[in-house]
Amino acid sequence: MSDINELAQSLKDIENQLTDCMKCGMCQAVCPVFKETGNEGDVARGKIFLLERLSDLMLTDAKGVKTRLDKCLMCGTCASNCPSGVKILEIFIKARAALTEYIGLSPVKKLIFRGMLKHPERMNALIEAASKLQGLGTSQADPELGTQCSKLLSRFIGDRHFLPLSKNPLHKTTPSLDSPVGKSGIKVAFFPGCVTDKMNPEIGLATLKVLKHHGVGVFMPKGQACCGIPALASGDRKTFDSLLDQNTALFAEMDFDYLITPCATCTATIKEIWPMMARNNSKSRSRADEWAPKTMDISQFLVDVLHVEPSGQNAGQQALSVTYHDPCHLQKSLGVSSQPRQIIRANPGCEFVEMNAAGTCCGNGGSFNLQNYDLSRSIGMKKRENILSTGASIVATSCPACMMQIRDVLSQNHDNVKVKHVIEIYADSLE
């Protein structure tokens, strides 16, 4: 009965929020997916038309509605440009959860989310085993970018080029950390995120190096779980709740001044979605509410709290040209845009070059990339063109998922451009 009551309340909340939409079509003008397909059903306004009949459609075509809702990057471009301030991402997340609650998860997603993602130790063990076997059925795609491809897996992952899983994930090299506060007088909690941990541990190590350099104490508890957004984006509220409870219990073991992540998606999830979706009257809810104001992207923390400033280029040094891609969840959701650029400029060996349309979505969108790979790649190729037009030798960003997408489209064309996280560029200047 409680599940039915919660579902009814969720539908009521969605219905109340839909009334803010004026159907002006501003979302149509900026939606990356609509620009590719020209289909009204792919834009926020078209999806809101559907959701206005959600209670009825759940009884007649629930799967069809969910399929339409899933064809969305969840980039937030529509919300950030909405003149009425409609909370479109919140509506879509709640609607996906309601639909999944009604029709259930597919067997594959149930295995991935509830059988693996929900259990960090089990997930780590499976990833470790996969890292040892990943050479089977894969071949080198681009040696400069370090990417691979796989005809064997193309049926499931498309013709994408990807980085191999790390054989030395962050949770192995640095299982936990509780370093003392130094000259900064600040203690932070550190949430690396799944992609950093398992595919790009160098991002996590660069972050720890920078924090140590600035005398920041770090609390990184052992056994961290996923932030929960992959499950929630697929409508799996139960797995999200479990991951939220696990993480909040871990971080509650220590007092800290800020919660820092190097992942734009994790930052937005912890800061905005944890408080929004946490159950009422729970410890997780009170902790999420308390930590949201403390949660920051690493570049935002360095600039706004530690006051890191650009450095002048070393005389006689040949500067590396670096451009920057704004992750949607950082720029559009959190308004963090100038700080990453300032961190790039803090490396005296780098010359920053602004990219045209730096804030347009790269086309990854998490599960969107898996379910709509050709469409995702088409959007990504436009980002590639903007990167190449700068003439930069490095493209930096603040999101490991964006790095995956950008590296794929560059590798597909064997472009001689390196892909780095902003924190790696700054950490290099400290050597």
Image (cartoon, grey):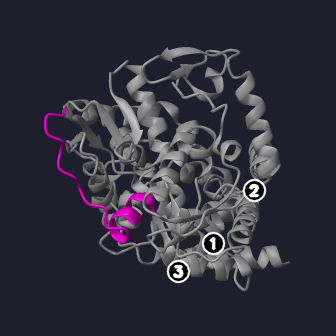
Residue 342 appears in the rendering: yes
Three-letter amino acid code of the residue under disc 2:
Ile
Residue 52 appears in the rendering: no
Residue marked by disc 1: 277
Residue 309, position as x, y percentages in the image: 26, 60
Q: Is residue 184 magenta?
A: no
Q: Secondary structure at mark 3?
A: helix
The answer to whether residue 29 is left or right of residue 371 is left
Residue marked by disc 3: 16
Residue marked by disc 2: 103
Three-letter amino acid code of the residue under disc 1:
Met
Q: Residue at x 52, y 53 (%)?
A: 208
Q: Quadrant of residue 162?
A: top right
The N terminus sits in image quarter: bottom right
- First in sequence, mark 1 or 3: give its number: 3
Three-letter amino acid code of the residue under disc 3:
Asn
Q: Residue at x 65, y 83 (%)?
A: 286
Magenta-highlighted residues = 297-317
Q: Quadrant of residue 109?
A: top right
